[in-house]
Amino acid sequence: MPQFRPSILITDAYGSAGDLTWYHRNGKCYTRKRSHPVYSGTAGQLEHLDVHRRALAAWRSISHQTQLVWNALAEDVEPHRPPFDHKANISGQNLFVSAYHGFYTLGNEHLPVPRAFDNFPPYSIDLRDAHVESGTLVIPTVVVLGGKETPGRYRLLAKLQLTTPGKGCHPGMLRNYLTDASCDSDDIHIRVPDYASIIGSSSTSCQVHGRFILLDNVTGYRSQYQQKSFLLQVAQ
């Protein structure tokens, strides 16, 4: 492939633009025709992509004045990703899309209205030994919120990987499971359909690795996640 020739204006190049891709081999930069692979994805990934596209389309559908309101609200919201230096903030579009995704996950997809981002209360999670109902693994879950927040405002989203005892976590294997009740309930469960295809129907115990997130039923926003692992006994 043609070698890239530096100039006074451009000394090096990375990435893609138009129909060209710049790449490096043995310390030299070359160009090649940019590839345009078709994203296959799993059914779940494609569904998530469709939701994201609807969220972006919804953002474009609101007035510029309303977008400015979202931008102003986002000035006080820190990113969920590092660096956590209290200096950065997200954009109004990020905040809007976050709310849209949150309401979709809660089963209430709609056009969100601008709302301030309230700090989430501290919370703890405990998973209890599970049982099986008609092929679904039912995991009793205890969520304890700190502060004076109304527990019914929040619902727990569990991103779980079920595996054999002692096996480590693979982030790419985490799957979303929304609890069947808000945090004010004394009877909260995580339900994993067709669990036998994951760990086998004869398993009497399983390792659960999870990232646990609070979803705000009012705003659609989500908290920072907590990462925890549990060893559960499974009653058949």
Image (spheres, rainbow, N blue to C red):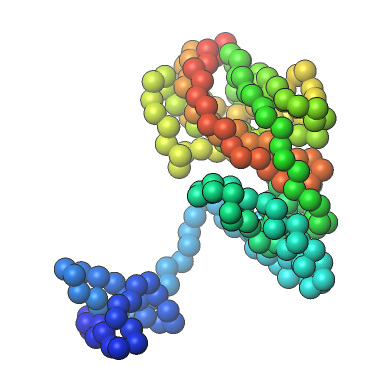
The one nearer the camera, 208 or 142, is 142
Q: Is residue 218 above or below residue 134?
A: below
Determine whether, in the image, residue 113 is placed left or right of residue 171. Answer: right
Q: Position of residue 50 (x, y in %)?
A: 63, 59
Q: Position of residue 24 (x, y in %)?
A: 25, 70
Q: Is residue 59 visible?
A: yes
- What residue sits 60% from the left and 19% below the top? 127
Q: Is residue 134 visible?
A: no
- What residue sits 55% from the left and 38% below the top? 175
Q: Identify the image quadrant of residue 186.
A: top right
- What residue sits 39% from the left and 20% below the top? 166
Q: Is residue 107 above or below residue 67?
A: above
Determine whether, in the image, residue 80 is placed left or right of residue 61. Answer: left
Q: How many marks?
A: 0
Q: Position of residue 116 (x, y in %)?
A: 79, 51
Report the quarter where the N terminus lies. Answer: bottom left
Determine whether, in the image, residue 207 is placed left or right of residue 6. Answer: right
Q: Residue furthest left?
A: 26
Q: Position of residue 35 (x, y in %)?
A: 38, 73
Report the quarter where the C terminus lies. Answer: top right
Q: Is residue 229 above or below residue 76?
A: above
